Image (cartoon, grey):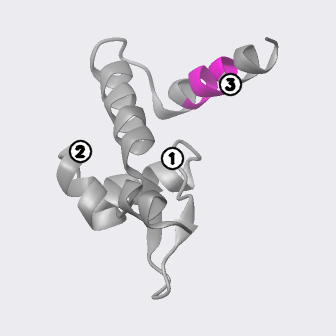
Amino acid sequence: MTTKNKKKLIKISELAKKAGVLISTIDFYVRQDLLKPVSFSQGNYRLFNKRESLKRLKKIKELQKNERLTIKEIAKHFKTKKNEKRCY
């Protein structure tokens, strides 16, 4: 992994702090397949892509607050968007 790529990866604690959520919230989203670590550190810490993960967490919050979607509906929303991208 290059130094440039390492700077883009953050631990779950940093991600939680920057997103304004609890670590347990991120753990829940990982278990629900809404968020995924991209790598693991030598100490076996989960590492997340900073930009993409913060963007995803923001979208989850928006869908919960503005659209009143459940976690299952949010997961379905992301799967639909992922499939649409594959079609092009």
Query: At 36% across and 17% down in the image, what residue appears?
Result: 68
Residue at coordinates 50% horizontally, 83% vertically from top-left? 44
Q: CA distance from mark 3 to mark 1?
A: 13 Å
Which residue has dot 3 on it? 82
Residue at horizontal 47%, vertical 70%? 46
Q: Position of residue 36 (x, y in %)?
A: 55, 52
Check the image and report above or below for 37 versus 73. below
Q: Residue 66 or 44: which is nearer the viewer? A: 44
Label 1 crowd bin: few (<14), some (14–19), many (20+), radius 10 Å: many
Report x, y in % for residue 61.
Answer: 31, 29
Give residue 76's position: percent from left, percent from top. 63, 25
Side of 18 where 54 appears, left or right:
right
**Residue at the right extreme?**
87
Residue range of the region highlighted in magenta in the rendering:
75-81
Dot 3 or dot 2, earlier in sequence? 2
Dot 2 or dot 1, earlier in sequence: 2
Residue 60 % position (x, y): 39, 30
Q: Check disc 2 and report the residue beneath it.
A: 19
Quadrant housing the C terminus = top right
Of all residues, the one furthest to the front in this rendering is 3
What residue did someone put label 1 on?
35
SS at circle 1: loop
